[in-house]
Image (cartoon, rainbow, N blue to C red):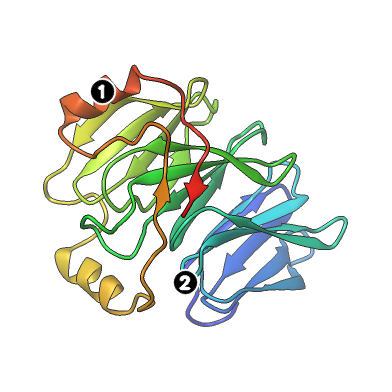
Amino acid sequence: MPRGTRGERTAGRRRAQLDLAHIVEVNVTAAAIVGEISADTAEGVAVSPDGSTVYVAETGQYYVIADNLVTKTKTQIEVGPYPQDVAVSPSGNVVYATVTGGDSGPDGSSVVAVINPATNTVTGDIQVGSAPRQVVFSPDGSTAYVTTETRIYEIDTATSRVVRVIPDLAGPQASRSARTARRSTSPTTTPARCSRSTPRAAGSSAAQLSAAQGPAPSLRRWR
């Protein structure tokens, strides 16, 4: 395995092991490296349930890479500034990407991008708290969980809406020093901001639950 690896996701006999520069594809049955996927600043990686596609969150860029291992095609899916993690639902019908943004302040991001894997396009955003980081689906795919600076957001995947907010003032991400270190090494360019037809400000748990009762996530419009 390459040094400096950050994580791995598996699907059947395929395993995607990543470092910051590339992803190594390993056939776990044969215990052999069978390929590599180049990346700029890979952070999160996920493999589709059938093992045909690897999704990579390019945290130093504005997109998620969808690399089809069958057709050997690679697609850049623009999701927003500095995506950190990506997850595929157990059914393979939807992909979530956390759009972390450049910081956790007013110029940061607070959305999870919803990707249609059939078209490799973003179909909408789910509003969560400031600087979303990690995302994971429940085993049955009915629920997804997203960590932010001080909360964990539970999402109903059928409606793409937040149904519960779990406070964690100690920070579900990592220690303050680790978050500070991440921001100090983030790209220095100013993240682009996207306007939405129904913008929602991040706020208290009650406000987020109220927002969850509103319209479904809207398509983004980049300025």
Q: With 203 as the anchor, is 88 left or right in this view?
A: right
Q: Nearer the viewer, residue 173 or 17?
A: 173
Q: With 139 as the anchor, is 178 left or right in this view?
A: left
Q: Quadrant of residue 68?
A: bottom right
Coordinates of residue 76 in the picture (x, y in percent): 66, 60
Q: CA distance from mark 1 to mark 2?
A: 31 Å
Is residue 35 depicted above or below 51 in this figure? below
Q: Secondary structure at mark 2?
A: loop
Q: Which mark is residue 68?
A: none
Q: Secondary structure at mark 1?
A: helix
Instruction: Read off the residue under disc 1.
Output: 209
Q: Residue furthest right?
A: 71
Q: Nearer the viewer, residue 160 or 2?
A: 160
The quadrant in which the N terminus is found is bottom right
Give neighbour class at mark 1: few <14, some 14-19, many 20+ (Cα, 10 Å): some
Coordinates of residue 138 in the picture (x, y in percent): 48, 31
Coordinates of residue 129 in the picture (x, y in percent): 27, 43
Q: With 160 as the anchor, is 72 left or right in this view?
A: right
Task: Give the mark, 1 or 2, whose residue is nearer the N terminus.
Answer: 2
Coordinates of residue 156 in the picture (x, y in percent): 44, 24
Is residue 150 depicted above or below 216 in this figure? below
Give neighbour class at mark 2: few <14, some 14-19, many 20+ (Cα, 10 Å): many
What is the three-letter code of the residue carrying label 1?
Leu
What is the three-letter code of the residue carrying label 2?
Gly
Q: Residue at x 36, y 60 (%)?
A: 101
Q: Residue furthest top?
A: 213
Q: Residue at x 37, y 42 (%)?
A: 146
Q: Residue furthest front?
A: 223
Instruction: Read off the residue under disc 2.
Output: 60
